[in-house]
Image: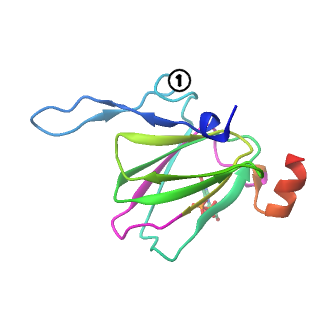
Amino acid sequence: MTLQERCPVLKFDDLGDERGKLVVIEGGQAIPFDIKRVFYIYESDSTVVRGQHANKESEFVLINVAGKSKVRITDGSEEIIVSLDKPMTGVYIPKMIWKDMYDFSSDSVLLVLASTHYDGSEYIRDYDEYLELMK
Ligand code: TYD
């Protein structure tokens, strides 16, 4: 499987009507895991690079619910860059994939859905260590 196939861009149901948009994401249905944690990142500017880690246990879906950002995704051999700029779409990031989020617009609100509760010890924050583990 290519990295792109392992990290698909998911399109969510839009139940909007004349009153406005409504996007629904159900764990285990629209995304391939049950949601245990939600966090969001905002007021990161265009010079900031966030993420810079891989996770041994967590899977994520990243959605820019407002504004724009980009995520660079790699498994140590392939690399893809996904532009996040639509509240109806998100990118799925499985375990053991390295990610950098950057190029945040000033109005960016990056919503992250995670399959686990937070555990700092499952984060790999050293890229050389990550490459070693991926060998
Ligand atoms: P960090 O992982 O550096 O954020 P990002 O991946 O967006 O660059 O997290 C920043 C701080 O917040 C760090 O001290 C860990 C803490 N944190 C939690 O306590 N719980 C969480 O769910 C997350 C994502 C971070």
Secondary structure beneath disc 1? loop
Residue type, label 1? Gly
**Is 86 contained in the magenta span?**
no
Q: Give above or below for 77 relative to 26.
A: below
State the residue at coordinates (53%, 73%). 48
State the residue at coordinates (41%, 70%). 43
State the residue at coordinates (84%, 55%). 131
Give the mark count: 1
Q: In the drawing, does residue 133 fall left or right of residue 11?
A: right
Residue 116 image-quadrant placement: top right
Q: Give above or below for 101 relative to 49.
A: above
Q: Position of residue 98 (x, y in %)?
A: 70, 53
Q: Position of residue 59 (x, y in %)?
A: 64, 39
**Colour convention of the picture:** rainbow
Q: Which residue is mark 1?
A: 28
Work out which residue is located at the far bottom of the displayed protein and give it: 47
Few, some or many C-alpha atoms within 10 Å of disc 1 (few <14, some 14-19, many ≥20)?
Answer: few
Q: Which residues are magenta?
A: 102-121
Q: Position of residue 62 (x, y in %)?
A: 50, 47
Q: Nearer the viewer, residue 36 or 74?
A: 74
Residue 32 image-quadrant placement: top right
Q: In the drawing, does residue 69 fall left or right of residue 120?
A: left
Q: In the drawing, does residue 65 fall left or right of residue 110?
A: left
State the residue at coordinates (55%, 56%). 71
Quadrant of the rendered image holding ligand 1: bottom right
The quadrant of the image that shows the N terminus is top right
Q: Nearer the viewer, residue 68 or 78?
A: 78
Work out which residue is located at the far top of the displayed protein and give it: 29
Q: Give above or below for 66 relative to 19.
A: below
